[in-house]
Image (cartoon, helix red, strand yellow):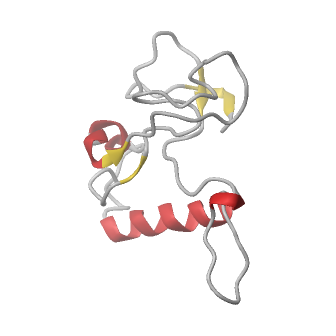
């Protein structure tokens, strides 16, 4: 999870106040301890697994040429599993590093539940 001050949060994201843009839209396959392992292969997790999974979900949705600024990630949230617990740091319960109901920093809008949010 990270933020950028080069862009503000998109209009589609319902923040209480303008903030630097949080770069997470989705959550997928956390650290290597929660990664995937098959006989003869090593454990992987994080971006090494999640980036190809999310890319694959976008490919399955088959609408890459028509999506606008990840709009479906915000308008079809019912097609994502909302991650409501856990943290990726210590920041006093702030949504920047603590999973909460709805949008939050560590998990974005949630994990894929089919392709409708893509």
Q: What residue is drawn where x is 56% and y is 23%? A: 95
In this view, the residue farthest toward the bottom is 40
Residue 72 in the image: above or below residue 4:
below
Q: Nearer the viewer, residue 24 or 4?
A: 24
Q: Residue 5 at what x, y percent from top left?
A: 68, 25
Q: Does residue 40 appear to the left or right of 15 in the view shown?
A: right
Q: Residue 13 at what x, y percent from top left?
A: 42, 27
Q: Does residue 31 appear to the left or right of 27 in the view shown?
A: right
Q: What residue is drawn where x is 34% and y is 47%? A: 80
Residue 10, can we see it? Answer: yes
Residue 115 in the image: above or below residue 90:
below
Q: Nearer the viewer, residue 77 or 3?
A: 77
Residue 62, can we see it? Answer: no
Identify the image quadrant of the N terminus: top right
Q: Does residue 36 appear to the left or right of 25 in the view shown?
A: right
Identify the image quadrant of the C terminus: bottom left
Tell me how many marks there are.
0
Q: What residue is drawn where x is 70% and y is 20%? A: 91
Q: Residue 43 at what x, y percent from top left?
A: 70, 72
Q: What residue is drawn where x is 31% and y is 50%? A: 117
In this view, the residue farthest toward the top is 17
Residue 104 in the image: above or below residue 16:
below
Q: Residue 74 at what x, y percent from top left?
A: 35, 37
The image quarter in which residue 50 lies: bottom right
Residue 12 in the image: above or below residue 35:
above
Q: Nearer the viewer, residue 61 or 33?
A: 33
């Amino acid at each position: 999870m990270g933020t950028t001050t080069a862009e503000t949060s998109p209009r589609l994201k319902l923040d209480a106040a303008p903030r630097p843009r949080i770069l997470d839209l989705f959550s997928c396959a956390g650290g290597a301890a929660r990664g995937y392992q098959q006989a003869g292969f090593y454990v992987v997790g994080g971006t090494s697994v999640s980036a190809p999974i999310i890319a694959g979900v976008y490919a399955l949705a088959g609408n890459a040429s028509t999506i606008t600024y990840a709009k479906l990630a915000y308008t079809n949230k019912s097609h994502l599993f909302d991650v409501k617990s856990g943290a990726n740091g210590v920041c006093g319960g702030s949504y920047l590093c603590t999973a909460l109901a709805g949008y939050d920093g560590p998990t974005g809008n949630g994990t894929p539940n089919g392709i409708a949010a893509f």
